[in-house]
Image: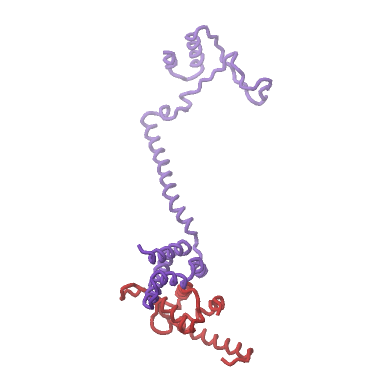
Chain colours: A red, B purple
Amino acid sequence: MKNEQLKGHLDLLLLQILDGAPTHGYQIACALRERSDGAFDLPEGTIYPALHRLESQGLLISDWDTSGPRRRRMYRLTALGHAALRTQRVEWTRFVRGVGGVLGVTA
Amino acid sequence: VNTEDDIVEEYLDELFVALRGQPRQVRRMLAETEEHLRLTIIDDLARGTPAEDATVAAVARFGGAAEVARAWNASTPAEPMPTFLRRLAAQLVPLAGTGLIAIGLSGVIARIMTALWGRTFMFADHPARPTRLRPVAPGCPSTHPPGVAPTPTSPKPKPMAFSPATPRESLDSFCSAWWSSSAGGADCRSLAA
């Protein structure tokens, strides 16, 4: 998938990956690559601006985890983030169903 | 410092220069970037990749500094005042303040000295102490170029008449003529000494 196409859906993907335990940026990049089976090969550094933006929108919160040998910034969803994830999943499902209907492809 | 560290440090330097925004946010981005690169390198080393190759690959996967900075700057709200203007103002404000304090102090000192020694001591061009002595004697060269008449609106200086015989007589007659027309003191003759 082209990077420009992926960027349009990056927020949804990040929210989905963070729908669980607190996660740091490197784990998010790995999850994005592994769950897409290598299809989403975005420059990993571009994840961080998106994470910071989502945090400034109140969808995420983050703090430094200093329990290990190196400190890591851990991200997790807020209540607003969970709500945004639900909304965006519904919109995405409707969109895929619509495109599939037009193309004659069942998702 | 080994080569792998150099590669990471150079990348962080590039990114630092290209990132825009609040210093705290920029520092956080750089810290996360460094951590991300270190973890990527550690993973690759664990898979048997040589250290330098792992470092180069980690930087490549993270994306070029310009590309990452473009994504960052696009998602960062513009500052009310650009960083370089803030730095310039931070330099100029103390300088201007120091200048104003110096001007104020010089005024205070001038007032004190005036109170102690009078206005004629402080201000050389005070009306009570004429300092210009430019008599125009007959035969002095004109200030106008040859063949050019002075403009009618410009007042012609009134010549101060005296006829020098010897240098000493010349000075004496000049002084008496000048001091008789002014409120000067009696120090003129000391100039001839």
Vertical side of B92 occupied by B14: above or below: below
Residue at x-position 48% and y-position 26%: B127
Q: Position of residue A47 (x, y in %)?
A: 47, 74
Q: Quadrant of the N terminus of chain B?
A: bottom left
Nearer-the-camera pick, B58 or A47: B58
Res B160 quadrant in image: top right
Nearer-the-camera pick, B49 or B67: B49
Q: Position of residue B37 (x, y in %)?
A: 41, 71
Q: How many marks?
A: 0
Side of A50 relative to B109 (left or right)? right
Q: Position of residue B180 (x, y in %)?
A: 50, 15
Residue at x-position 50% and y-position 10%: B170
Q: Quadrant of the C terminus of chain B?
A: top left
Residue at x-position 46% and y-position 61%: B17
Vertical side of B118 occupied by B89: above or below: below
Q: Position of residue B183 (x, y in %)?
A: 47, 20
